[in-house]
Structures are given as C-alpha cells and as structure tokens.
C-alpha cells in the first residue's frame, strides 16, 4: 500500500510554497530545497519508462461534496479518481481508426442503417475480486448507473441510445439500439467518461471490485485518495501499464497551493493552474509546465439570456459578440498561451466548423447595432465565479469591453463552487459566464442546446436541432460536415453565446515524468501509462 499522506503536513508545505511562489521563482527553489523532495532514481533516463514508485498528483477538489460515486459526483476530481480506479469503454484518439482507442472493449460494430451498435468486449478482463468482466457488467454500468445520472457527461448515452432496450448477446457482446440513426456513436461511447463497474454495484467504497489500472485503498472527501497498482489490469498484456506501484490524488482548491506542492516536492503533477501561476512556474528549471493540446481545450464563454430583453434582439447579441477584444484577452489574461475563439464550442474536433470567418473586434459596429436596437446605454450585470482558472479575469476584461461600447455593465463574482450550484437560478441570469469542456461540436449542441434545454438560455430552434440530427445520421463524412457546418453557421450568426477564448489546461510536473498524456482525455487525466523519472 502507498504510504499514507499527512494532510496537515501536506497543507503546511503547500502554504509555505505558495507564499514563496508569490515572491518569485528564486525563493521557490530555496524553499523547495528544504522540503520533502522526490529525488531522481538511479538509472532513470528520459527515453525509457521506469516501473515503480508512487506518483502524487494534486487537483481542484470539491471539499466535502467529493464522492466515490462518480456517476453522481459533482466535481472533476471525482471522475479523475474514477478513471484511475475503473476500466473505461474507450477514449477519443484522433490518430486511431474511427477516432477512438478502445479500453475494455475490443471493437464497436455499427449496422449499415446506423441504428444498432454492438459492443464487443475483450475476453479475460478481470475484476479485483477474481470475477470476469461480462456483458452484464457493461449493461449495468450504462443502462442502470449512467442512465440514472443527472450529470451532462453521462446524459450523452441516454440521449443517443435506447438503454431500456439494450441487451446482452452472450457474455462478450452488448447490443445498443440507437434512438435515431447516428454515425458518431463510437465517439459518444468512447469519451473516456464511460467507465465499467461490476453488475449490481450501487454504492462505492474501497472494497468495490475494479477492473481499472489501480486499486483504491484510502479515500477522504476534500483531502485525497490512495491507490496501489492492479496487477491484473487488462492493459498490462497490451503494454499499457500501469508502471507505478501506487498513486495518490490530492484535493487542493487553490492554484498557488497546488503549484507550491509541486515546487516543495510534495507533489509530482498538478492540474489546471491559473495563468499567472503557470507563468511563474515556467521560470523554474526543476519543473515542466505542460499545457493540454487541442482538442483538449476549455472554451470560456458568456451566455446571453434570450428570455430576457434586450437579448431577444439579434442585433444586441451581435453587438455583444463584436464588443469583446479577443486578442487582448488572450495576451492579457493568458499571456499568449491560449487561442482566440469564434463563438462556437469544440474547437479542434473534426466536426467543428473551422471554415466560418473569424468574428472581428468592432466596437463601432457594436455601438451602431445597440443604437439601432434601442439598447444604447443598457444596463446589465455579468455573473461569474472562479470555476476554472482565468474565468473571472476574462469576465473582468469583458465588462470593460462592454463599457467601451456604451453598455452600463458591472461584474458580480460568486464564491468558488456557487455559480452552477443552483442551476435553475443560473439559467435565469441575464448574462452569465460559463465554460465548455472538450466534447465534439454536435454532441455539445445536443447535450446543452437542443430541444430548448434550460442550459440553452432561451435558444429554441427546431430547424437547427434537425440539422444537427441529420448531420449525425450521415455515414458520408462530407455530407455530415456540410450539414454540421450549416447548423453551426446559424449559431454563429444568431446565437446567444460569446466564446472569445480557448484555454489549455495548464498542468505542471516534475522533470522526467512521462506518460500522462498517453492516457488521453487530458481534461480528466489518467495515470495508467505514467512513469516517474
């Protein structure tokens, strides 16, 4: 079992290092040299993966709300923990056939009419209680647990597949009927978040059987979790690890405290740092700052509520899009380490409409549109919160941009974790900050926009919904792209979302740590292929 972590000692080290971080990288190095360090192992090289050791990783957590029930867990760390613990159906992999890398599945077959998906399981996948993975386990995980979840990441399954009529075909096949013909069902099922637990599992504890890369040995909500290697992991036979003896995941909400844990030697990997924190760390020769790569980027956005005047006027919505200085936001908030957005989510995914013209920063036209709409001098409050690094800073700049075009805008910042806590109240806000995790474009539309979803902030366009459904039903890639682009063009022209920037997850790690990006799904990293220096 990995050594137990001392939360009090760990926080003390993180606090001291956070103070040092504010003072500059020179002091960080001095403080780190006096703490507990992960010294390089004899014989380690940058070109080969070394087996053994316990990797310590820090993430933004959710305090007491953290749970082992990842099907209902509200925090990103809940899913990170679950990915270390349970086997996955698969992950998105742009370099692989059909764009997916399978996990406990061997393949997914699709009927010619695109209405039936057959999941073929690997034989010999074992749970830690000695039982073998069968179709009953996959059916339970999808048709019972995922289908009963209210989290958007799991809604994709029930929105696309008739899970009530899913069935086993022997021990190693699961037949999923699609709700409607879809060509992209593999991408839905292999998002990286569809994980498999044993049939009958309803509650979760350290004793819950797993078929993932690690076995959970310790968990305290708001503090952390400890794992040991699962020697029976199916990926070992495929050369997919795990290489580590153990893994510790620690819950630390503050970006500087996470960075301080890294520089003091109390952590080997830290996730999703604030831009200014990452910029400071970049000057430290003892660590590497590792941004996530496209398409694993987060879109920062502002939603206009079309149920609230004057956002029911298309001219006002266009003015609010033209008002934002995207280049300034990238350079000021993210020090250039971000990408200008074009008011559409899912940049970098194959179905993203990258052929549309880039919307310009045009404050003069924005003023004219507001005047024509009778909205000159309108008052509005933009509500935001520190739900992901850079979110508040981007909202602050946007308020200033709106003031420059004559809008009497002000900012309301809620405490961390409160912006989406009452989601019904959130969807009634006139202007609200948001962020989009990396999911393909048409799936993003279906999850949060189609059918007049509350998350759509008043957008109700059945004809665009139909375009998206039609695009997803095409086996011909060119036809699917044309239809999908048509739908996104309407969103770009008439929609109620200002999406000015895509930011990477700014992660940092000790020198020589390898393999985390090889586990894919970089917004919720896995560690089955990670190796310490």
Image (spheres, rainbow, N blue to C red):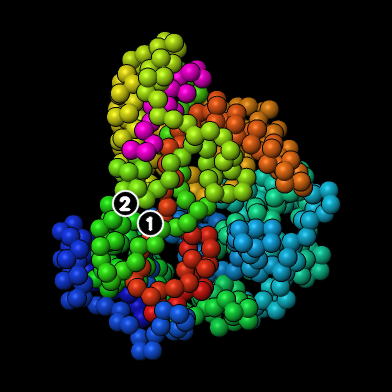
Q: Residue at x 69, y 67 (%)?
A: 105
> Which segment is the magenta one?
312-328
User: Chief secondary structure of the magenta span?
Assistant: helix
Q: Is residue 515 visible?
A: yes
Q: Quadrant of the C terminus?
A: bottom left
Q: Quadrant of the N terminus?
A: bottom left
Tell me if label 2 and label 1 are in contact, CB under 8 Å. yes
Q: Nearer the viewer, residue 283 or 57?
A: 283
Q: Quadrant of residue 430?
A: top left
Q: Quadrant of residue 193?
A: bottom right
Q: Residue at x 32, y 60 (%)?
A: 252
Q: Relative to 263, does residue 472 appear above or below in the rendering?
A: above
List x then y, in percent, for residue 87: 59, 69
CA separation, marks 2 and 1? Answer: 7 Å
Q: Relative to 500, does residue 70 appear above or below in the rendering?
A: below
Q: Relative to 294, does residue 367 appear above or below in the rendering?
A: above
The crowding category of the residue bearing disc 1, from other C-alpha atoms within 10 Å (few below 14, some 14 to 19, many at least 20), is many
The residue pinned by badge 1 equals 506
């Amino acid at each position: 079992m990995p050594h137990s972590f001392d939360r009090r000692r760990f926080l003390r080290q993180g606090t001291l290092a956070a103070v040092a971080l504010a003072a500059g990288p020179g002091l960080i190095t001095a403080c780190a040299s006096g703490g507990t360090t992960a010294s390089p192992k004899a014989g380690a090289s940058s070109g080969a993966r070394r087996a053994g050791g316990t990797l310590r990783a820090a993430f933004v957590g959710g305090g007491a709300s953290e749970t082992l029930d990842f099907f209902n867990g509200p925090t990103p760390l809940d899913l990170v923990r679950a990915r270390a613990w349970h086997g996955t159906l698969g992950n998105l992999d742009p370099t692989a056939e059909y764009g997916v890398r399978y996990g406990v599945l061997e393949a997914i077959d699709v009927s010619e009419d695109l209405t039936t998906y057959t999941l073929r399981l690997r034989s010999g996948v074992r749970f830690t209680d000695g039982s073998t993975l069968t179709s009953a386990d996959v059916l339970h995980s999808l048709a019972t647990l995922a289908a009963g979840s209210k989290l958007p990441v799991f809604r994709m399954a029930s929105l696309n597949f008739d899970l009530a009529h899913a069935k086993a075909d022997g021990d190693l096949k699961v037949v999923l009927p699609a709700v409607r013909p879809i060509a992209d069902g593999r991408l839905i099922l292999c998002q990286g978040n569809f994980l498999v637990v044993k049939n009958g599992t309803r509650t979760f504890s350290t004793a819950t059987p797993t078929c993932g890369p690690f076995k959970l040995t310790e968990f305290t909500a708001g503090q952390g979790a400890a794992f040991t290697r699962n020697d029976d992991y199916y990926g070992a036979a495929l050369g997919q690890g795990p290489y580590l003896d153990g893994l510790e995941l620690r819950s630390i909400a503050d970006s500087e405290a996470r960075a301080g844990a890294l520089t003091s030697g109390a952590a080997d990997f830290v996730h999703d740092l604030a831009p200014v924190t990452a910029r400071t760390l970049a000057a430290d020769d003892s660590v590497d700052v590792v941004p996530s790569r496209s398409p694993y980027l987060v879109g920062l956005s502002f939603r206009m509520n079309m149920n609230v005047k004057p956002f029911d006027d298309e001219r006002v919505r266009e003015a609010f899009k033209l008002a934002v200085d995207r280049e300034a936001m990238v350079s000021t908030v993210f020090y250039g380490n971000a990408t200008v957005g074009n008011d559409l989510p899912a940049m970098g995914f194959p179905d993203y409409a990258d052929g549309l013209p880039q919307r310009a920063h045009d404050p003069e036209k924005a003023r004219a549109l507001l005047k024509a709409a009778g909205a000159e001098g309108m008052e509005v409050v933009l509500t935001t919160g520190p739900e992901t690094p850079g979110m508040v800073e981007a909202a602050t700049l946007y308020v200033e941009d709106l003031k420059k075009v004559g809008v009497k805008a002000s900012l309301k910042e809620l405490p961390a974790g409160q912006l989406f806590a009452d989601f019904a109240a959130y969807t009634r806000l006139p202007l609200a900050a948001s962020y989009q995790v990396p999911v393909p474009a048409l799936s993003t539309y279906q999850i949060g926009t189609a059918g007049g979803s509350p998350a759509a902030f008043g957008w109700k366009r059945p004809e665009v919904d139909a375009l998206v459904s039609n695009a997803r039903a095409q086996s011909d890639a060119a036809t699917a792209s044309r239809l999908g682009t048509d739908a996104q063009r309407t969103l770009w022209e008439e929609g109620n979302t200002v999406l000015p920037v895509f930011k990477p997850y700014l992660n940092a790690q000790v020198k020589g740590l390898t393999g985390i990006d090889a586990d894919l799904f970089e917004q919720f990293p896995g560690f089955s292929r990670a190796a310490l220096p």
